[in-house]
Amino acid sequence: MKSSRVYLDHAGSALASESQLAAIGRDLLQMRLSNPHSRHPTSVRTRDIIDRARNRILRHFNTTSDHFSVVFTLNATQALKMVAECFQFGEHQRDSEITSNLESCPDGVFVYMRDAHTSVVGMRELARHRCNRVCAIDFDALYDLPAGQLNETENHSRDLFVITAMSNFCGRKYPLHIIERIHKWRPGQSFVCLDAASWVSTSFLDLSIYKPDFIAISFYKIFGYPTGVGALLVRNECCYLLQKQYFGGGTVNLADHSHFRVHRKVDFVESLEDGTMDFYGIAALERGFEDIDSYGGIKAVQQKTFALASRAFRALSTRIHLNGRRIAEIYCADSDYGSSETQGPIVAFNLLRDDGSYVGYTEVEEVCDLFGIELRSGCFCNQGACQMYLRIPHEQLIANYENGKVCGDSIDIIDKRPVGALRISFGRQSSEYDVEMFERLLDACFVSSPSLRVPLKSGVISEPTLTNIFIYPVKSCSSIKVERWQVGTSGFQYDRQWMIISAGGTVLSQKRYPLLCLIQPQIENGKLILMKKGNRTDNCYAEVPLRIRGGASPESRRICVHRVQTVDCGDEVAEWIDAELGENGCRLHRVCDQRSTSSSNDCGFGIASLSNEAPYLLINRRSANYLAEMVGLKLEEVIKRFRANLIVDGIEPFVEDNITTISIGGVNFKVVGKCSRCQMICIDQESGKKEANLLLALRDYRLGSKVTFGIYLQLEKPSGESILQTGMNISYTT
């Protein structure tokens, strides 16, 4: 369970403790449960455990079954969806429209906050055809609600307000006394659904004081495990407001197959819980509550996590660059971070360079990975808060989307403005050490220090020449240095044609498995040979034929954004890889292309490549030398870290950034883009150890632009079997 990595994404999911999971494991071995809809003793015992879990949940929120009912769901999202599907708005008089104004609203409105999780915003799609208006508002607009507003004409429409208890974007806690104000707006007509998923993860929600009508929660946010159990808490006085259309197993007394007639369960909870619930997951909730108690209870967790988040907030807000400029833009409702009553243990921010430009959050994530720090980036499924705090106009939001920006991608800055943020968050298992590591990261990587930049030297420039050729037969493994090699449309022959697949089906890379760099491929006598660097013995290598065996069945596999066909290379090499990496279930696969044929196989399909962006990658030796001098590394080590196919010399440093076409020994290539760099260049290719200096030096050289090094090439006009050889002359255009 113990990990050397620092986990700062507790708002995404809490971490289950080792003792909690051990207790659950013992329960699973000793406790026999079954479908609670049966009548035998095991089923009855299961129902009893589920009922005890309902009461334990209510006790956690300082209430009882006299006041609230607990409906189990998959998560908070399903709980919110259930409310949207089932809430009875009453008389529907007009087609709904979206507005931000509550004034002169008709009865029967659906209201949600702009600072809301996507799951809340999605409720409007189910409500819009059954209510008279949809309102997306800022929280402060709720203070303008006049009390006791009633229509002059009798109307049986109802209003539903969905309130964010705590922002999952920045941790702002909204005053829950607003619930009472909403109830008084249109007495008996206005109801409140509280999205409490973020709030209850680390804070106490006292339902003896606050009386929302519906509350949505997810237990993995509180305990870390179980991950597929949530709940909808319903105030008993409001059960009549939720009326389902669909019915599933366990929710009806009779379903008439001859008529559209169904007699539903009289018990409210039974009528809503479709099918068989996750009874083992529900049984595990008790261990989660016990774990919270072992930390002193939820109130102690609230104080501890707020103290840690406050320290992280101060670390960001007080640090400045050498020129006096701040290092971070923090997104927070209170400039002093408030108290645990108004602020949850979340800090949302973007980092700034000493020239005032933003550091892209993708770049920050890559550096964090080097330090073993895990955080969240993007808009955190809260587009409204992201748009508000980052001051993104609606027109710009739409333009960004039309230009290709979508949720979950790596686009972090558009027109010099961030389109998302970074978020760190704390939970019951967080510690002072976590904050210390975060502070070290800031000081080492994002607070400016005396510049390491050295002047670009012109020196004596020789004729542009190809000095080195490297191929990488197995993706993310070591290279083979060659003097001459055959080129093709998909890259050098045998370049990046094999990959190692984990037992879970993912492609291994040095980002997560840096020791891959110690696997040395060789191509000899019609075979691919894998060995450990510098240690080839009779018992310490594996080999596979270059020719794909007949009868091999290709498999479809996703590599980055592409889907490729691969064939398995057999058990012998797989066992060798497992032994070298200390893993279980790894397989070596070779990529193939069923659309063509090749003389290198017996199966009727040709060979493709696993290159990420383009078949060839070229770097300039003089540019690499500039970076080597900045960080004090040997030139050859820097060249190896950039893992290029073609190394050229005789070109001024970084001139390659502007090259559009290049000819090497008469073989013509076109430039198809620059190579964006990640934390892989921080891995020493001889030891597998990581250190951040090279990435930081490249970042500092680029000064706010994308962190790129090297250019991608593609053959302009493939013809026959061309050969490249070191020493060939080069010409290029810019």
Image: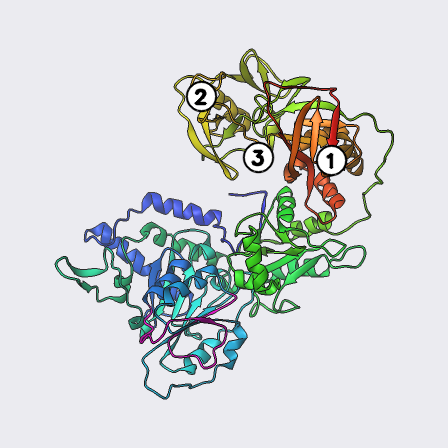
Taking depth in this image into account, of 689 and 411 the one nearest to the observer is 411
Badge 3 marks a residue whose secondary structure is: loop
Q: Is residue 461 visible?
A: yes
Q: Is residue 226 visible?
A: no
Taking depth in this image into account, of 69 and 472 the one nearest to the observer is 472
Q: Position of residue 232 (x, y in %)?
A: 37, 63
Mark whose residue sits in front, 1 or 3:
1
Q: Is residue 628 magenta?
A: no
Q: Is residue 95 magenta?
A: yes
Taking depth in this image into account, of 642 and 597 the one nearest to the observer is 597
Residue 529, above or below 331: above
Badge 1 marks a residue whose secondary structure is: helix
Which class describes the residues within 10 Å of circle 1: few (<14), some (14-19), or many (20+)? many
The residue that label 2 is drawn on is 570
Which class describes the residues within 10 Å of circle 3: few (<14), some (14-19), or many (20+)? some
Checking the image for residue 494, the label placed there is none
Q: Amino acid at mark 3?
A: Asn
Residue stretch rendered in magenta on the structure? 87-115
Magenta-colored segment: predominant secondary structure: loop
The residue that label 3 is drawn on is 612
Q: Amino acid at mark 2?
A: Gly
Look at 59% across and 49% down and name the residue there. 411
Checking the image for residue 656, the label placed there is 1
Q: Position of residue 495 (x, y in %)?
A: 58, 24
